[in-house]
Amino acid sequence: MEIREVAGRGSLVDGRSHVVIVGGGFAGVAVARGLANSEVRVTIVDQHNFHTFLPLLYQVATAGLEPADVAYPIRTIFGHAPNVGFRHGRVRRVEHGANVVVLDDGSRLAYDHLVVATGATAAFFAIPGASQYAMPLYSLADARRLRNKLLLALEGADARADLDPQALTFVVVGGGPTGVETAGALSELISISLRRDGLRLEPSLVRVVLVDLADRLLTAFPESASRYAAKELRSLGVEVEFGRSVVEVEERAIRFADGERLETAAVIWAAGVTAKGTLAHELSVVAGPGGRAQVGRDLRCVNCDNIWAVGDAAAVPLSDDEICPQLAPVAIQSGRHCADQILHAVRAEPLEPFVYRNKGIMATIGRRAAVAKLPRGGVIRGTLGWLAWLGLHLFYLVGFRNRLRVMINWTWRYFDWPSGPRLIVADAETAE
Ligand SMILES: Cc1cc2nc3c(=O)[nH]c(=O)nc-3n(C[C@H](O)[C@H](O)[C@H](O)COP(=O)(O)OP(=O)(O)OC[C@H]3O[C@@H](n4cnc5c(N)ncnc54)[C@H](O)[C@@H]3O)c2cc1C
């Protein structure tokens, strides 16, 4: 479908309302799915030409999965929907008065309805050196960079056969699901590399340290789940340290508030997310907590009648005084609801408020260990939790081929057969 770029109202192009969705993550894709084959014209704009399944990024970073296993071309998702088009590019700003978004290359895209689904980004809390030297995990490029860094560190230590403890100390900052999952998978990567790849490293010199400011892991889960996660991680060889406040990250070290300076091969940053610095925050509508766009219960931005925000980019109301967490089910449900409301608006029908249906939360700790908090508060853990985690992630992964590949990969890993894409795919000069 040809997308003509004109200034002014998008509907002037062919009489249909034009919905521009910025972001092809869980939320943006859910909006577009809800509008596919309807009477509106849709353009998804994303800086990547693929949708990324963020919950499995840590497996790409720790060489469990390939990048292509967790990404899917946005054009292919909507190949069957003639009213949905894709535009590859980064939206730089929104011109409200003109109903136009401006892309990095200067091109302008007119809209009747704009959906901001730009997600969030890593929060570094202005800690000196953190944004420069710590490695976040928020995009496929981040995951690939981290994987190269980890594998290069292992190869470097093997090549030098040195006994420098710094060369094999990896620090994960943040004890939420991403930090727990990454630390567990990193420990498994190291153990599999030692057993299967013949690396000449002294296992006792390899350290994976998980630090958190809080006094327990997975604070969104009940305490029993936190204790279980800490026990499982320690059994994998991860050092779990609580009450540790990071004050500075250097190129090869991390410093804590208590004065300790720990030399490291890599600092992996899983300390939280923010919408500050993203398009949602830069929109000149009211900013909500964490830089998220403030939206009403119908998901329209406050004081706007044709700008909507969904997913991580939005402070989606949960109740009168609470907002929804930044999770994939919130993104998917808010995206679906937004699509319905846009159709109501186009048809001049009344809008309905968004109601979040809690599906629970999950975190995996390693092969055969996971915790799941059910919607009513109960906890499943161990192999059962892990199987539930596997099933759910396979269900939400986009594309049958990706599901099949991931399932084969996980089965392989489950039986501990030698496998895994432990490839350093980087320029030899820059390691990028
Ligand atoms: C490592 C990690 C693990 C996670 N694990 C879980 C989990 O286990 N369970 C769970 O429920 N949630 C998990 N989450 C959270 C979940 O992934 C997010 O809540 C969800 O991805 C939000 O969806 P979204 O569509 O709002 O944003 P995103 O999925 O982040 O998508 C945003 C999209 O917008 C695009 N974009 C951004 N800015 C621009 C711009 N200016 N112009 C064009 N395009 C732009 C991006 O390229 C991206 O494609 C995890 C998140 C991370 C980072």
Image (spheres, rainbow, N blue to C red):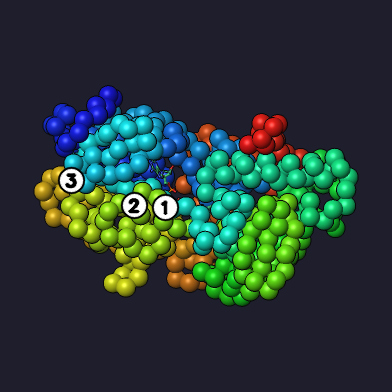
In the rendered image, residue 220, in percent from the top left (x then y), is placed at 51, 69
Q: Which residue is mark 2?
A: 282
Q: Is residue 156 left or right of residue 143?
A: right
Can you see residue 332?
no
Image location of residue 383, percent across then percent down: 64, 59
Q: Is mark 3 within 8 Å of ligand 1?
A: no
Displayed quadrant of residue 294: bottom left
Closer to the chain start, of discs 3 and 2, is 3
User: Which residue lies at the image location 84% right of the left edge and 53% below the top edge?
Assistant: 164
Label 3 crowd (10 A; few <14 / some 14-19 / many >=20): few
Residue that appears at 58% across and 60% down: 128
Tell me which residue sits at (73%, 51%) in the image. 265
Decide: is 159 above or below 123. Answer: above
Q: CA distance from mark 3 to mark 2?
A: 15 Å
Q: Which residue is label 1 attached to?
A: 277
Amino acid, disc 3? Gly
Secondary element type, mark 2? helix
2 and 1 marks in contact (CB < 8 Å): yes
Q: CA distance from mark 3 to mark 1?
A: 22 Å
Q: Which residue is mark 3?
A: 97
- Name the N-terminal-most of marks 2 and 1: 1
Q: Residue at x 59, y 73 (%)?
A: 214
| Residue 33: numbered disc | none
Image position, residue 249 (x, y; %): 64, 58
Label 1 secondary element: loop
| Secondary structure beneath label 3 | loop
